[in-house]
Image: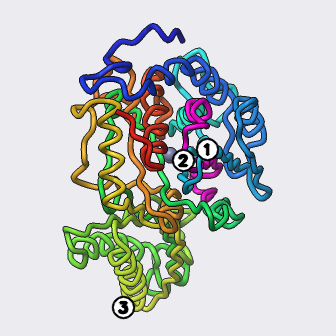
Amino acid sequence: MSKNTLSTDDARDQHGNPSGILEQANDVFDDMVELRRDLHKWPEVSNHLPRTRERVLQSLEGLPLDITLHQNTSGIAAMLTGGKPGPTVLLRADMDALPMPEDTDVDFRSKVDNVMHACGHDTHTAMLMGAAKILSARKADIPGRVLFMFQPGEEGHNGASEMLAEGLLDVGPESPVTGAFAIHAASNIPGGFLGLKGGTMMASSDFMNITVKGRGGHGSAPHFTLDPVPVACEIVQALQTLVTRRVDVFDPGVVTVTQIHTGTASNVIPESAFINGTIRAVSERTRSLIHDGLRRVAEGIAAAHGLEAEVEIGNGYDVTVNDTDYAHFAADVATAVSGDRNVRLMDNPVMGAEDFSYVLNRVQGAMMFLGLMPEGMDIMKAAPNHSNRAMYEENYMRRGAAVYSSIALRHLGVELS
Ligand SMILES: [Zn+2]
Ligand SMILES: [Zn+2]
């Protein structure tokens, strides 16, 4: 974990070194690596991450932060108040892992069975801790405040909304939160590369449960039954037709059936069949169009065959929408830190989902991806986020910490170069 093993131009670039921030990021690199590896070794899932919270608090010890421990979750809100008055800027990292086994051979691999930091949240937490150190050292010169949001439960537990409900943004009218920013690591994007876009950045994510209710009986005599099996198959096919025929190709959506369960024996027609899957959209318009269509198609097909379909649609995360001006601002800052060949305004959103969407529903801001693909890896072979083999290049955590810090300072009006 030596900080002298820079294999690329991470510490310097053609734009120079904005006001020493990258040097500061170098200085906190060892601390970031230490925290990241410790969290990686002892990952926790859901909204309750007691060890992780303890460890993060330890890493912030001695910094001039006002810390609020959230009660309903393991969330930490840490406020840095600058030496001059001004608004508040929010920087966010998520801290939770995934319920899955780890199959990497790094020597700090997970010691917890079936729990792995496979979405890079350990690196986010380390980078935000690094930014807290960098910005704390500049406290006197900061015209405003920086709110560091360490959230649990991003992986399906909506930790962000829990923290919002507990008053995360209630920071007083004299210094309101005027911008919110987040960085998400990607294990299959080249190291140090930053990507974002204005407008929709990530999709909404909802789930569907469809129960096709028929009447069971003998496999040899289907006419005495209401067989749910062919009806379930027809519904699955028709959902794909719904997506290709009803959804505007320029405002896309995805419906993926991931489970079909029914039956117990080769000569028994079951009473019902169960279909489950995920729904993604990049606008609220397409999202509700798919919800309505899915109900109509499933219920209509079942009714056509004399059966019934019960459709349950569960709302997951909202569409994550970057404010266009804030996204361009964040891209400019990232360019100043890392050079323009390392920053790209993306053409298309990503169909994954994020609960940072709920923060962006309340405050203008932007989230971006940071490539942490290990050095020398083939991009086509790199294990993506959520893979049991996902690995992350720690060297570029410096860039993440520097970008977080620079965004906060520039948002509050500090000139950096
Ligand atoms: Zn994830
Ligand atoms: Zn994630």
The answer to the question of whether label 3 and label 2 lie on touching residues, with beta carbons closer than 8 A, is: no
Find numbered disc 2 in the image and state the secondary structure of the residue it sits on. strand
Task: Confirm whether the magenta stretch covers residue 148.
Answer: yes
Between marks 3 and 2, how big is the CA–CA gap? 66 Å
Locate residue 325 relative to residue 119 in the image: left or right: left
Locate residue 40 relative to residue 127 in the image: left or right: right
Disc 3: CA contacts within 10 A as few (<14), some (14-19) or many (>=20): few
Q: x and y percent of residue 128 in the render?
A: 56, 37
Of 147 and 105, the residue lying toward us: 147
Q: Which mark is residue 304?
A: 3
Q: Which residue is mark 2?
A: 143
Quadrant where the image shows the N terminus: top right
Which of the 4 image quarters holds residue 297?
bottom left
Locate residue 415 relative to residue 57 in the image: left or right: left
Q: Residue visible at 50% across and 80% down?
A: 311
Q: Residue visible at 49% across and 67% down?
A: 207
In primary-sequence order, the first of circles 3 and 2 is 2
Of 155 and 54, the residue lying toward us: 54
Q: Nearer the viewer, mark 3 or mark 1?
A: 1
The answer to the question of whether label 2 and label 1 lie on touching residues, with beta carbons closer than 8 A, is: yes
Q: How is the image coloured?
A: rainbow
Identity of the residue furthest to the front in this view: 84
Q: Which residues are magenta?
A: 134-160
Locate residue 337 relative to residue 359 in the image: left or right: left
Between marks 3 and 1, how big is the CA–CA gap? 66 Å
Q: Which residue is mark 1?
A: 82
Disc 2: CA contacts within 10 A as few (<14), some (14-19) or many (>=20): many
Give the residue type at disc 3: Ala
Give the residue type at disc 2: Pro
Q: Please determine whether, in this image, residue 115 is positioned above or below residue 331.
A: above
Between marks 2 and 1, how big is the CA–CA gap? 6 Å
